[in-house]
Image (tube, rainbow, N blue to C red):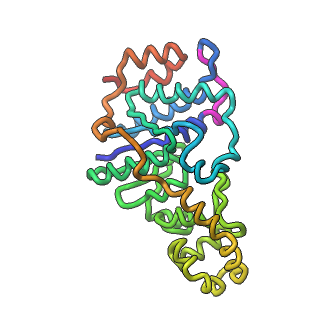
Amino acid sequence: MTAYLIDGLAYVFRSFYGMRSMSAPDGTPINAVFGLGMTLQKLLNEHEPELVACCFDAGADTFRNEMFPAYKANRGSPPEELVPQFDLCRELAARMGLATVMAPGYEADDLIATLTGRLRAAGHEVVIVTGDKDLAQLLAPGVRIYNLAKDDWWTAAGVPGRMGVRADQVGDYLALTGDAADNIPGVRGVGPKAAVALLAEFDNLEAIYADLARVAALPVRGARSLRGKLEAGRDSARLSRRLVTLDSAAPCELEIGQMRYRGAESAALDEFAATWGLQRVAGRVRRR
């Protein structure tokens, strides 16, 4: 059986910034709620998942902020119009019949990693519904990524062609290059080409730092100065590696049996849809 794990917050933000302004009957902004609902409706109708869960972030601060207070600090506070929509998005997913999960101090990515491990151990295949490249580190036999917005599928075999490294090297790659979207520093002066060359030669971050003397001989532009950049950025690289590592043992009480999709409970969904002006979302959702 194939389980679908949805990176809920990614589609909340995509909907908010990609859709025109919309308001509920009481004036509350609902463009993100509507967009997420249509996204979930499309997934449910086109793929008919037997097991599905929608994972959300619980709040701004996580254990990564304790390690590095500047983590994601570049994003600032969410727009005022989006704030009231977070809870509505989670409630809509639940009213549509999806299992929903979040854990204080952890991100949706950690929950996806945790559930992926449990599902694979139980013999299920996993589809991670996201457009986030960070989750490529979870790709392996039996685990795929589906970017619903682009109708694009990722497998572990395809990661080298997209990123230049294997799926199991994605965390090391991001530790070297950093990730501006999450304010992860990486190693100053090390870009994608250098990171790919380093990992092709040394396989992982620890192996690079165990044998820096060989870096100068790499067939990459600026190899001689690269060793110095790596030495200067040693602490930053290791911090960045911890920041991008997904916690596959995040606290998650959701049981696999609770992920079975049976459809929405009609009265609950219709009441929610009427209150918030989401009848179009509710119209094509499978009912119990």
- Residue 261, x across and y down, in percent: 33, 33
Would you place residue 279 above or below residue 102 in this image? above
Which residue is at a point 57% across and 76% down the rendered structure image? 209
Q: Is residue 60 left or right of residue 229?
A: left
Would you place residue 94 above or below residue 145 in this image? above
Which residue is at a point 55% across and 27% down the rendered structure image? 33
- Residue 198, x across and y down, in percent: 59, 76
Would you place residue 39 above or below residue 131 in this image? above
Q: Is residue 286 left or right of residue 229?
A: left
Q: Report the front residue among 37 and 168.
A: 168
Is residue 175 located in the magenta-colored stretch of the structure? no
Q: Report the front residue among 143 and 173.
A: 173
Magenta stretch in the rendered image: 16-24
Residue 49 shows up from this direction: no
Residue 266 shows up from this direction: yes
Is residue 21 located in the magenta-colored stretch of the structure? yes
Majority secondary structure of the magenta segment? loop
Which residue is at a point 54% across and 71% down the rendered structure image? 205
Would you place residue 268 above or below residue 101 in this image? above
Residue 208 falls in which quadrant of the image? Answer: bottom right
